[in-house]
Amino acid sequence: METISFVRLEKVSEEIAKTFTRWESDLELIPLSRPNRSQEDLKKVEVVTVEALEHRLERNTIFLIYSGSKLVGEINYQIDPPQLFKKVRGTAWVGITIGEKEARGKGIGSQAMQFLEKEILAAGLKRIELGVFEFNKPAIALYRKMGYVEIGRIADFTFWNGRMWQDIRMEKFPGV
Ligand SMILES: CC(C)(COP(=O)(O)OP(=O)(O)OC[C@H]1O[C@@H](n2cnc3c(N)ncnc32)[C@H](O)[C@@H]1OP(=O)(O)O)[C@@H](O)C(=O)NCCC(=O)NCCS
């Protein structure tokens, strides 16, 4: 087993932006990682430029996930973004992508979530909220296993497989 490590993204390189572009253009990942309004939306891909990724860093704290020396994914949080289901001050909105297929299902997602919860606590935040599409069973299983509890559902949130699906919102109070 390779060692898993987490590195805060501070300086964006061309290579990192290219890797994000590859993940965000992956037709298997697009339905899981962003809301889509239609079948056409599911095919839309955009280049993630160095500037665009730097812009994300103004609001997001991003950690790169390495397996050995290979960049396999990213995990991030944002403080009190507008999309929160429950607008509790001091909430971290969390997102995770294990971009490399061969790195999934090996415990890396669990480890990354544990790591991020510690970072969130250290940043003085008391609550975590996340959104997961109702058809994303592996992700729902991961969050449940880690103690996340469903707090609400938003209907007609994203298009996949011929119809619209709900967004499930979950919360956790880390450290409690
Ligand atoms: C969802 C994701 C973050 C999980 O990370 P991972 O490293 O693959 O998951 P882990 O190996 O740590 O597994 C943790 C738990 O997740 C669940 N899980 C993971 N893969 C699963 C699968 N293929 N089917 C069902 N459950 C699965 C299980 O509950 C597992 O616990 P267990 O091993 O004790 O059964 C990762 O697969 C991923 O990035 N997927 C694509 C993008 C995505 O869906 N992001 C989340 C959007 S909300």
Image: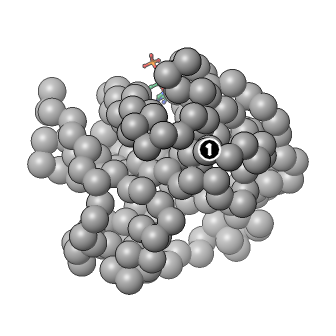
Which residue sits at x=45%, y=34%? 121
Q: Quadrant of the C terminus?
A: top right
Q: Quadrant of the N terminus?
A: top left
Can residue 145 be seen here? The reply is yes
Pick the front one: 21 or 163? 21
Quarter of the figure with residue 170: top right
In the picture, measured across the screen, residue 14 lies left or right of residue 145, that is left
Above or below for 52 versus 142: below
Pick the front one: 61 or 135? 61
Pick the front one: 160 or 109? 109
Quarter of the figure with residue 81: bottom right
Which residue sits at x=80%, y=54%? 157
Above or below for 83 versus 115: below
Pick the front one: 65 or 44? 65
| Residue type of the residue flagged with mark 1 | Thr
Q: Residues within 10 Å of mark 1 (few under 14, many from 20)?
A: many
Which residue sits at x=39%, y=56%? 62
Query: How many numbered dots are placed on residues in this image?
Result: 1
Residue 167, position as x, y percentages in the image? 75, 45
The residue where tag 1 is placed is 91
In the picture, measured across the screen, residue 97 lies left or right of residue 79, that is left
Considering every residue shown, the one lying at the far front of the view is 124
